[in-house]
Amino acid sequence: MISDSLLRARTFEQKYIAHQDPKRPCFHVTGTVGWINDPNGFSMYKGEYHLFYQYHPYSKEWGPMHWGHVKTKDFIKWERLPAALAPDTEADRDGCFSGSALELADGRHLLMYTGVYKECGDDLAIREYQRQCIAVGDGIDYVKCEGNPVLSADNLPEGGSPNDFRDPKIWKDGDGFFAVVANRAADESGSVLLYRSEDGFHWNFVKILESNHDAYGRMWECPDFFALDEKQVLVVSPQDMVPMGLEFHAGNGVVCMMGTWEKESCSFHRERVQSMDYGIDFYAPQTVETMDGRRVMIAWMQNWATSRCQDPAADFFGMMTVPRELGIREGRLIQNPVRELENYRVNRMSYQNVLVNRLLNLAGISGRVMDLTVLIRPATKKGYASFQMNVGEDGEHGTSICYEPGSSILKVDRTRSGGRFDIVHERSFFVRPQEGRIKIRVIMDKNSLEIFVNDGEQAATFLLYSPVTADAVSFEAEGAALMDVEKFDLVV
């Protein structure tokens, strides 16, 4: 039985499903209409990959959260499905917040999400409470469990906050299930809680898996926990980060922790911490294991500090990153666009050993929906002081990607990328030195720019606000550099 609230949302969004807004990206996930943020329920179900997302269809502002829904077979072409959840029960009356999903042995699709309700206290202050809920369905329609919530304040460790208790990530392990859930600890910083279930419906607290102690931001949101290349990876999205050199920037970020997992004692031993993305617009990633054993990640291509940067003419706001394959190389997490993207590459243009010692353009190297790879190296023993690639140019607009081999710093500057808001426009980060060699791959989809350095050793994600007609690409160097260029248009 579909509730009146969910039916209203489905009826409202149906008017927009067939609408082809020219401002929409070609292959990045957007909501049917209105606002979206965190990816949810990224899972394989009956041979397809389903993705849900935080959704407020009625406006381009954050509001009472629903779950929007799409599915795909190849991570590039997505089919829109009706909204899956609406806030319509006592357990989630003020919002269906982030969560995850998996396929049960009986063929049902299980969603685990955060239900939110607000209450006015004796002091007349309104407080928000969060707890975990379950719904099951067939890939289209979902029924919320009568026993919701399945986790509440009664299931928190001592000092755990019932007001910041959210974003469950569930996985199957043998004959049972585990889930990690974000929580604010007694010291007011973030922690990740571990829960176990035999059936996916009845849950027990196991332990505090990892704690922040104010080292990386404050509250940790949207945890994910998975095995990768003989390591265990914990991903969290901290709020209120402070800068740590060029590795972690101020504000909201995403932190990746790698280590080992002792299953019997349910202990995670952290060995390495790194930033997940070095750009500006990347938050709340979630992963899925594919049918062929890859670990694929998708994230909200936005940041809370830039969420007011909206196009008043568009009927949607928010989008996801291109799905990315994860791996570990020399102890470092790496990420690259899913290989399926290559099936949509056309119109190859290629140049080898191009000397760059001045500003130049190359015939056929332009676009705003493209896959562009540039390999740079010194042209002489003296080398070069800096190399710069400029994308999305039209004389007035442009975004620069500049590498200085002497400092091994890559800097991205979107100051001239059409933004009309007083927000951050620059990011710099260290790149592993390779005697002046660097490989930069750029994926553009109208108003998005995703950069992958040295086959995924670093990724940096940015939104652009310039018109898509600004599509020129230029190259320049201080000194003399050689470059190889390969460019494809992307047609989806």
Image (tube, rainbow, N blue to C red):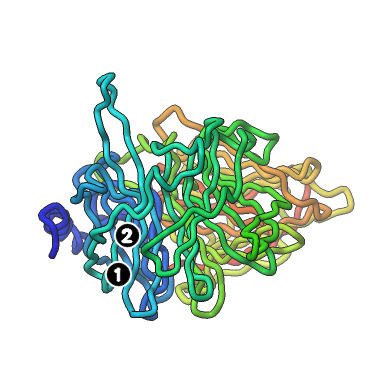
Residue 451 locus on image (x, y percent) = 57, 54
Residue at the (22%, 64%) spot, across then down: 143
291 and 190: which is toward the camera: 190
Judge whether 19 appears above or below 417 on screen. Answer: below
| Mark 1 residue element | strand
Residue at the (61%, 69%) spot, across then down: 350
Q: Identify the image quadrant of residue 148.
A: bottom left
The residue pinned by badge 2 equals: 134
For label 1, the crowd category at 10 Å Cα-Cα, with few meaning under 14, some 14 to 19 and many 20 or more, is: few
150 and 278: which is toward the camera: 150
Q: Is residue 370 visible?
A: no
The residue pinned by badge 1 equals: 79
Which quadrant of the rendered structure holds the N terminus? bottom left
Q: Is residue 309 visible?
A: yes
Residue at the (63%, 39%) spot, across then down: 248
Q: Is residue 311 left or right of residue 206?
A: left
Residue at the (26%, 48%) spot, across then down: 91
Depth check, mark 1 against mark 2: the one in front is 2
| Mark 2 residue element | strand
380 and 310: which is toward the camera: 310
The residue type indicated by label 2 comes to Ile
The residue type indicated by label 1 comes to Glu
